Image (tube, rainbow, N blue to C red):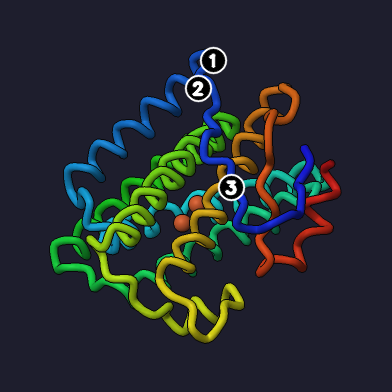
Amino acid sequence: MKLIVQNPLKVDLGVHHKVAGLSDSIAFGFTKTLRFCADTFVAKRYGHRAIVLETVAAVPGMVGATLTHLKCLRRMCEDKGWIRTLLEEAENERMHLMTFIEVAKPTLIERYVILGVQWVFYIAFFFLYLASAKTAHRVVGYFEEEAVISYTDYLRDLDEGRSPNLPAPTIAKYYWKLDDDATLRDVVLVVRADEAHHRDVNHGFADELGGLPGAPGTVSPYPEHAAETQPAARSKS
Ligand SMILES: [Fe+2]
Ligand SMILES: [Fe+2]
């Protein structure tokens, strides 16, 4: 799998891994169920939607990194850079959360939902990863396809004036090295590029675990803020 460094905001919006086999069907069905829940609960309140979903999105990378770490200890084998890549993904998702918490404030009900969902999702994803790491990464790949769609909708909302294009939060300007006069639109663009990157990395990892060749088409660049992990990720190519 090749990680191509190019314009960091150039995102292939049309990437979809075609469902093939039981593992993909489970992953796709799981994703669509969660999408339905998100659509029902937070709908088009994009700031709130981002907060709730980012608390979920930050879990898989940490679970994957932990279980890959333990596997490498048991088998005394190389991780080929995956542990750092997955840890970086988890941190990146947490930074999305820390950014959007500056844009919208979760309601009390949303905080309780986040609490409950974290218990259920962490345990479910942990056991799914133990049972089939390939399916678990496919789930994340499909999650990220949905995330790209959601942030594209958010961009449209900003462009058409339904959501205010606020100044970018300070934490976002620092993390993504944005200009001082950056706006929320700039932030959503870089976040969407991150999600596209996670999508391609996770589909690629699922393909590799399933013995398939790397995902075809454009692979998003490694995020600039994670430049120190590029050599580890590239060692797979
Ligand atoms: Fe995210
Ligand atoms: Fe993501």
Q: Report how far apart the C-alphas of labels 3 and 1 lie in the structure.
A: 24 Å
Which quarter of the figure has residue 203? top right
Label 2 element class:
helix
Disc sitting over residue 20 in the figure: 1
Q: Amino acid at mark 3?
A: Val
Foreground tag (3 vs 1)? 3
Q: Which residue is mark 2?
A: 24
Q: Which residue is mark 3?
A: 11
Other residues around mark 1 within 10 Å, as few (<14) / some (14–19) / many (≥20): few
Left or right side of 45 for 118: right
Name the residue nearer the viewer: 17 or 181: 181
Q: Earlier in the sequence, mark 3 or mark 1?
A: 3
Q: Are the residues at dot 1 and dot 2 in contact (C-beta closer than 8 Å)?
A: yes
For label 3, being within 8 Å of ligand 2 is answered: no
Left or right side of 171 for 233: right
Q: Amino acid at mark 2?
A: Asp
- 201 versus 58 height, above or below: above
Which quarter of the figure has residue 193? bottom right
- 232 versus 168 height, above or below: above
Q: Report how far apart the C-alphas of labels 1 and 2 lie in the structure.
A: 6 Å
Other residues around mark 2 within 10 Å, as few (<14) / some (14–19) / many (≥20): many
Residue at 63% in and 32% down: 206
Percent of width and height locating residue 98: 41, 73
Can residue 200 be seen by looking at this rendering? yes
Percent of width and height locating residue 89: 58, 57
Left or right side of 194 for 149: left
The C terminus, quarter of image = top right
